Image (cartoon, helix red, strand yellow):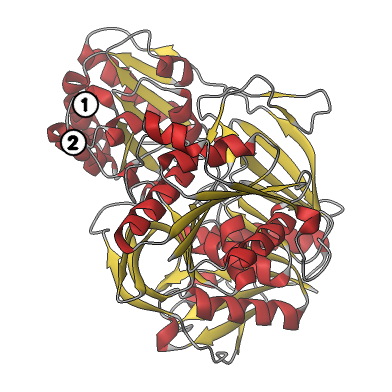
Amino acid sequence: MCILVILEQRGAVRSCSLEAASTAKKVSEASGMPLHGLYIGASVDAVLPSLAGIGIETLYACEHEELRHYSNEQYVPILCGLAQDLGAKVIIGPASALGKELCASAAARLRAELIQDAVGLHWENGLKAEKPIYAGKVMSEVMLTATPAVVSLRPNVTPIERNGEALPQVVKRDRPQATLRSVIQEVVSELVGTIELTEAKIVVSGGRGIRGPEHWPVLQELCDALGAALGASRAAVDAGWIPASHQVGQTGKVVCPDLYIACGISGAIQHLAGMRTAKTVVAINNDPEAPIFKNCDYGIVGDLFEVVPILIGEVRKIRNGN
Amino acid sequence: MKIAVLVKRVPDTASVFTIREDGKTVDLSGLTFVMNPYDEHAVEEAIRLRDEVGGEVVIISAGPSECKDTIRSGLAMGADSGMHITGVEGLTARALAEVMAAGLKRLAPELVFAGKQAVDCDGSQVPERVAELLGMSHASCITKFVLEAGKALVEREVEGGCYRLCFELPALFTAQKGLNTPRYPTLPNIMKAKRKPIEELAASDLALDAASPAPGMAVERLSLPRQNRRCQILTGEAAEQVQLLVRALHEEEKVL
C-alpha cells in the first residue's frame, strides 16, 4: 500500500510534478501510506537534487536513453508494473499534456477510476478530489472509493513545499521489453526564451480589440517586460491572427496565473471559463459596457494602444527597482 | 479504410448552469446542445482522409436518444453511417470506455479519431482508455495528421512545443483545435444525412469481456465558484490610471 507520484521530466523534473508530489505528500501523511515516486527518463542523477525535502521515500527510476522522451507504449507498462508491484492505492500525476495521456492509459490498464485536471486533492476518510467541470463554471467534489485511484493535478494551483533536505532513496527498475508501433521522429520545442501559457505566473491576452495580427508586438513587449506568456481570445484565434495554441477559454487553455491582463477582450463567458481561477485580473478595453469589467479586479476603460505602452514603461520602472 | 469517430453531445459553450436541489447534479433542462467542439475537428479529419484514400466514416456516440441528433450532425458533415449506444446512464468514464471499446471492436476500424476532451465534464480520458482497451497505439491532442505509405504521421501538442510521431495502424488520435477547420454542413448534405443508417445498440447487448465495473467514485457536492472580483474601474488620464494600476498590483496584490 502506498501513494505513487509520477515525476514527469524534461531533463529536469517539471514544476507541475513537484506540485503534484507536494500534494501527494499531504495525502500520504493524512492516509498513513508512504509516498513513493516514479522517474522515467535518461538520467535520475540529474534530477535527484530537485527532490530534496519533497518527502518522497523511495524513488523508483527507470533509466534508458530511449526513455528520454515520453513514449506512451513504453511509459504505460513501466507505470502500471510498478503500481501493481507496490500495491499503490493512489497514483498522482501532473495534468500536463503528457501527464494526462499517461494517467488515462494507465487507468484503463489498471481498470482504475481517474480524475483529470483536479485543482485540489486531500484525504479525509478516503480520497477526495476537487474537479472543475464545464470549464470551471461548476466545481465538483468527488469521493474516489475504488482502488487504485488515479488523479492528475492541474499545474500552478497547488504550491511546491519542502521540509528539510532529505533525498529519496533510489531504486532502479528494469525497462520492460516492448514491441513498439510508434516512433518519435522529432521533438520540437517552440520555447525559445518564452514562457508556456498554462504554467506562466503572468498571462497577457489579446482579443478582437488588438485589431489585427500586426499589433501583437505591442502585447509581446508587455509580456517581455512582465515575464508573461501571451494568450488570446477565441475571436483573435478564429480571425486567424494567432495559432490556436494561444487560445484561453473553454475550447482553449485553462490558465490560473497570479496576474491575468486582458487587452481588448470583451469577456464572453467561454473566455471567462479559461481564466476564472486567475488570482488577479486586469482588463483594458475601450468599451465600458464590456462584460470583462464585471469580471476583473482592476479595469481601465481606454485605448489599449495608448494604455499598454505606458504600462510597459511603468512595469520596467518597477522591475528595475525604481 | 474504415475510420471511426467518437463524438459526444454537450451543452453549448455559452451555457450558464444551475445546480439541482440534490446539490449533486447540474440542471441541463432548457440548454442548447451541440456536438462537442473538439469532436468536430475529429469528424472533419476523418472525412478529409476518406475523401483522399476512400473507405467509410462511422460516427459513434453513447448516451440518450438525443445523441442521434449529434450523430446526424456528423453525417451531415459527410460521414457515412452511425452507431448509437444506449443504456450508459450513470456509468463513469471507466465503464463507458469499456462499452465504447466493445462497440468499436465490432467495427474493427483502422483509424479512430475523437476530440481531445468533451467540454462538459472535461474528463479527458475516454478515447485514451478505448485505445488502451483495444490495444491500439495512440496520441492525444494532435494538430497535424498525414497518412503516408500506410502509416500515420502526426504532430501532438505538448506545453511549449510538439512531438512529431509516426504510427502503425490501427491507431487512435484525439484532435486539438488547430488540426483543421471543420466544415459547415450544406443543406443538401443535411437532407442526405436523414437517410444515412444509424445502428442502435444497447450497452447490455455488447458482449463485454467482464461485467462493467460499478462506479468507483461519487460526486459529493457541486458548487458554483464565486467570483469575488473587486471590479474597480480606475479613473483619470491614461497615465494616472496606469500608475494607480501598477501601484495596486505591486503593493496590494503583490503580483508585480
Tell me: residue A158, above or below residue A148.
Answer: above
Nearer the observer, B238 or B112: B112
Mark 1 crowdedness (10 Å alpha carbons): few <14, some 14-19, many ≥20 = many
Q: Residue A306 is drawn in which quadrant?
A: top left
**Amino acid at dot 1:** Ile
Chain of the residue on which disc 1 is drawn: A
Q: Residue at coordinates 60% horizontally, 46% vertically from top-left?
A: B198
Query: Are the residues at dot 1 and dot 2 in contact (C-beta closer than 8 Å)?
Result: yes
Tell me: residue B213, above or below residue A132.
Answer: below
Give the mark nearer the N terminus: 1 vs 2: 1
Q: Residue at coordinates 79% horizontally, 69% vertically from top-left?
A: A33
Position of residue A7 in the picture relative to residue B147 (left or right): right
Q: Which residue is mark 1?
A: A210
Q: Secondary structure at mark 2?
A: helix
Residue A115's x, y, as percent? Answer: 66, 53
Q: In the rendered image, is residue A28 in sight?
A: yes
**Amino acid at dot 2:** Trp
Tell me: residue A320, above or below residue A188.
Answer: above
Q: In the rendered image, is residue A228 in sight?
A: no
Residue B116's x, y, as percent? Answer: 49, 52
Position of residue B92 in the picture relative to residue B143 (left or right): right
Residue A238's x, y, as percent? Answer: 30, 34
Q: Secondary structure at mark 1?
A: helix
The quadrant of the picture occupied by the C terminus of chain B is top left
CA–CA distance between discs 1 and 2?
7 Å
* Tag 1 and tag 2 share a subunit: yes
Position of residue B217 in the picture relative to residue B59 (left or right): right
Q: Which residue is mark 2?
A: A216
For residue B206, which numbered disc appears in the image? Answer: none
Residue A236's x, y, as percent? Answer: 28, 32
Q: Residue at coordinates 36% horizontally, 74% vertically from top-left?
A: B151
